[in-house]
Image (spheres, rainbow, N blue to C red):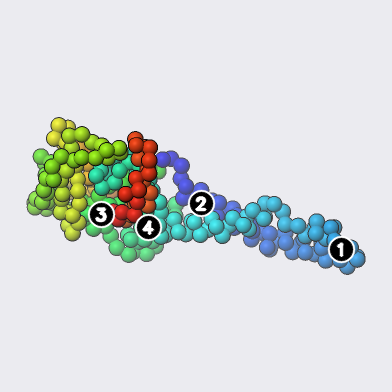
Amino acid sequence: MDFDFEAMLVFATLVTGMVWAIDLILWKPKRQRAADQLKQQGIEGEPVAAVSKEPILVEYARSFFPVILIVLLLRSFLIEPFRIPSGSMMPTLLSGDFILVNKYTYGVRLPVLHTKLIEFGSPKRGDIVVFRYPKEPSVDYIKRVVGLPGDRVVYLGRQLYINGELVPTQSQGIYVATGEGYMPGADLRTEKLGEVDHKLLVVESRPSLGGEFVVPEGHYFVMGDNRDNSNDSRVWGFVPDENLVGRAFMIWMSWDSILKRVSWERIGEFVE
């Protein structure tokens, strides 16, 4: 989506913090001096309370600043929630899943600027990552890391090869699901990608996107688990390291808009 919630949080933190700071440095001492002058004149009660009263703007700023700051810090450096908008990661993630993303796995970055401050690690093959779409950075995408910097990735005949080696898959038969998971004619397969065993879908009746790709340094090749229904690196290229947001690790809520119910059985599932 185009709305930048992170930028809004930063702006709100700055504004409320500045209002609170200005009050502490300038406005509050003036109110205190005015109250003291009244008391020296022998005036008490309502007049003193009136000049001492904190303005509504300052009251709101003082109340909201710590809350907004905590949300900003948590969301920017620790954990951020995301909603899955499409079926490109089926069967691992369904449209309507709400996931948690670890923001520090691949390093600590400044909010809005996205400049990396501390390097903690880099994506591993098989990780499910959230990233800013290279062609429209205001939009977040989620895919699985397939190719690392320097890898030669070939996807041909619905088979994945990395550096000349076939990535093993095994058919589990026809994929059966209802609601948001419904996808008739899909073949369910398991794939061992690096150290990760995961499930994926292929639909033989659909055209298969393929090709050969060499991943440049500082970039990653990503694909959706719904291999024949995913807008990924096969279409638009590689994900730069600076576009990484974090690694998905758990489903905390799931709403099936087709069955109009909460998918309780998915809540709490760890994402692999």
Q: Is residue 214 above or below residue 39?
A: above
Tag 3: amino acid: Glu
Specify the quadrant of the image occupied by residue 262: top left
Q: Which residue is mark 3?
A: 272
**Marks 2 and 4 close (CB-CB < 8 Å):** no
- How would you rate the neighbour count of disc 1 (Cα within 10 Å): few for under 14, some for 14-19, many for 20 or more? few
The disc placed on residue 44 is 1
Q: Secondary structure at mark 2?
A: helix
Which residue lies at the image location 12% right of the left edge and 49% below the top edge?
169
Disc 1, SS: loop
Q: Which mark is residue 9?
A: 2
Separation (CA) of disc 1 from disc 2: 42 Å
Q: Is residue 148 visible?
A: no
Determine the CA span between mark 3 and mark 4.
Answer: 17 Å
**271 vs 56, nearest the viewer:** 271
**Residue at disc 3, secondary structure:** loop
Label 4 sits on a secondary structure element that is: loop
| Quarter the C terminus occupies | bottom left
Q: Residues within 10 Å of mark 2 (few under 14, many from 20)?
A: many
- Where in the figure is residue 33, as x and y percent of width and height? 80, 64
